[in-house]
């Protein structure tokens, strides 16, 4: 990997797997990878705002299960030199940021980190970079800096920061932090706003890696020690830096706010007021979209008729709203959500119920992405499943077998090289092969265009975990 230092190193925290934007956001395809009808996903937009800005190559911290999706989205925007650190398990933001801090210091002992969540919306990239430039000056004076958003409503879904005196010696408007307040109720939020000394906590931090790690050692020595061991024991794996699992698993599960920022005495808040949203609910998504004269917005094939303040999102089919007000309707191929904007923060109750029912719709979409391409489940039945499989040019699936299903492959586009037991077959359009249960097999696209085929599975169990991988180009065997 190429490493450049620049004035600071963007650190993108992309390990979230939240489902607050279900049914679009799933465990296997969380919010940071969504586009909301734009050209770039939230992750891509977060990384892109620093391209060409004279800063260091980004460090992206993501979960092991999302590694290929992360790498593919970065490659799609021509960011090929990022360091992608894999978290073996979820341990919240303090350990994730610590991994990045140790890695940044290995390149530059004086590294300044700009830490951002991968799933927020910033309306004015230039304005953010200007505020960050001021924050870097504060960071170089050994402050731990956080950006504070001027609140526009008594929102109960955000943490709040209360401020004190202006930081002496700086003309950026930075203030000493008095207190961090975890998501207050509405009455407390109104009280905080009335003080005119509070900000929403944006989760954006700027500090020297060394200063942060010193604070971590003082307040969270467990995390300090185990993340150091996790990076010291990290190994390269394809495009990724895989943190040592045994060490990282021993880290306490704690956020940077609770673990460090609420304890340190060198924390300052720098006001930022140029369009920010954590898009943490469907009404928040609606708020950032362009609207018609009745306050309606939408993505995809949608139609509003006599509607007011209604958000429609279509993934596969036409969605029509008639006479609605203050609603969001989100359609995917396997689920539809209808939610009143006033209930946007209550979706977690529905998610908890679906979790208790072990609903697959929380886990993945009918289209699932893999390092070799993707597949789409067209029809699922207890005894059979029909999939459309797309394999990227030059890519190979793993050499594998199944104990509970057989498969029939029909090529509809491109050329396939198929290992089927002891045979190796070359199949072109309208040709097929049958793979009996227990037979070792592999699929390879040797061509220069995507390979597409229809797969029909039959058997007593059709789960994705019925795979025994013997060989794999992507380290999954």
Image (tube, rainbow, N blue to C red):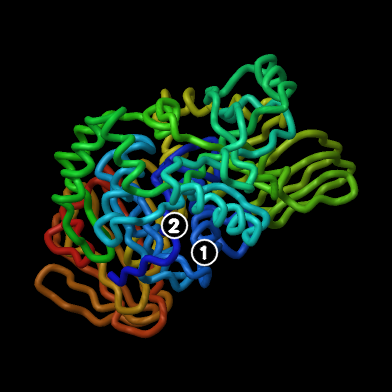
Q: Nearer the viewer, residue 358 or 16?
A: 16
Q: Nearer the viewer, residue 444 or 67?
A: 67
- Residue positioned 46% across, 39% down in the render: 361
Q: Residue furthest top?
A: 187
* Quarter of the figure that contains the C terminus: bottom left
Picture disc at residue 50 = 1
Q: Nearer the viewer, residue 290 or 57?
A: 57
Q: Nearer the viewer, residue 118 or 213?
A: 213
Q: Are marks 2 and 1 in contact (CB under 8 Å)?
A: yes
Q: Check disc 2 and report the residue beneath it.
A: 10
Question: How dense is the environment of label 1, judged by Cα within 10 Å: few (below 14), some, or many (20 and up)?
Answer: some
Q: Label 2, secondary structure: give it.
A: strand
* Quarter occupied by residue 96: top left
- Image coordinates for residue 346, horizontal then vertical, percent: 60, 24
Of the residues under marks 2 and 1, which one precedes in the sequence? 2
Tell me how many marks there are. Answer: 2
Q: Answer with left or right where residue 278 lies relative to residue 88.
A: right
- Image coordinates for residue 132, horizontal then vertical, percent: 55, 53
Q: Answer with left or right where residue 323 lies relative to residue 77.
A: right
- Image coordinates for residue 223, horizontal then vertical, percent: 25, 34
Distance, label 2 to label 1, CA atoms, is 8 Å
* Quarter occupied by residue 409: bottom left
In the image, is residue 324 above or below residue 47? above
- Residue positioned 41% across, 77% down in the render: 450
Q: Answer with left or right where residue 68 lies relative to residue 321.
A: left
């Amino acid at each position: 990997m190429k490493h450049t230092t620049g004035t600071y190193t963007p650190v993108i925290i992309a390990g979230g797997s939240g489902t607050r934007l279900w049914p679009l956001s799933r465990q296997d395809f969380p919010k940071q990878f969504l586009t909301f009808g734009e050209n770039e996903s939230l992750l891509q937009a977060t990384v892109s705002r620093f391209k060409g800005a004279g800063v260091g190559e980004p460090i992206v911290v993501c979960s092991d299960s999302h590694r290929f999706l992360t790498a593919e989205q970065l490659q799609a925007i021509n960011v090929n030199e990022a360091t992608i650190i894999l978290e073996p398990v979820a341990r919240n933001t303090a350990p994730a940021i610590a991994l990045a801090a140790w890695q940044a210091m290995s390149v530059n002992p004086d590294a300044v980190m700009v830490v951002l969540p991968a799933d927020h919306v910033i309306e004015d990239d230039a304005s953010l970079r200007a505020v960050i430039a001021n924050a870097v000056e504060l960071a170089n004076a050994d402050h731990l800096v956080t950006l504070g958003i001027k609140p526009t409503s008594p929102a109960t879904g955000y943490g709040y920061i209360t401020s004190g005196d202006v930081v002496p010696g700086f003309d950026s408007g930075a203030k000493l932090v008095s207190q961090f307040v975890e998501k207050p109720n509405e009455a407390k939020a109104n009280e905080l706003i009335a003080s005119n000394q509070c900000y929403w906590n944006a989760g954006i931090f700027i500090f020297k890696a060394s200063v942060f790690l010193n604070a971590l050692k003082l307040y969270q020595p467990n995390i300090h020690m185990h993340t150091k061991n996790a990076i010291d024991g990290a190994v390269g794996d394809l495009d990724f830096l895989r943190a040592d699992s045994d060490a990282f698993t021993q880290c306490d599960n704690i956020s940077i706010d609770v673990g460090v920022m609420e304890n340190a005495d060198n924390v300052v808040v720098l006001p930022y007021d140029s369009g920010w949203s954590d898009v943490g609910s469907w009404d928040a998504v609606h708020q950032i979209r362009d609207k018609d004269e009745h306050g309606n917005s939408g993505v995809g094939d949608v139609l509003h008729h006599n509607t007011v303040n209604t958000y429609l999102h279509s993934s596969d089919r036409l969605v029509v709203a008639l006479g609605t007000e203050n609603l969001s309707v989100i359609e995917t191929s396997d689920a539809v959500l209808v939610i009143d904007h006033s209930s946007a923060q209550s979706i977690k109750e529905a998610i908890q119920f679906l979790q208790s029912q072990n609903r697959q719709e929380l886990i993945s979409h009918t289209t699932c992405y893999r390092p070799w391409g993707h597949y789409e489940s067209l029809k699922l039945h207890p005894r059979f499943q029909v999939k459309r499989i797309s394999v990227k040019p030059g890519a190979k699936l793993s050499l594998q077998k199944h104990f509970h299903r057989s498969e029939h492959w029909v090529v509809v586009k491109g050329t396939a090289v198929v290992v089927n037991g002891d045979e190796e077959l070359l199949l072109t359009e309208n040709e097929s092969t049958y793979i009996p249960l227990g037979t070792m097999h592999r699929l390879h696209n040797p061509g220069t265009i995507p390979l597409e085929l229809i797969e029909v599975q039959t058997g007593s169990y059709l789960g994705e975990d019925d795979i025994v991988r013997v060989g794999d180009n992507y380290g999954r065997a």
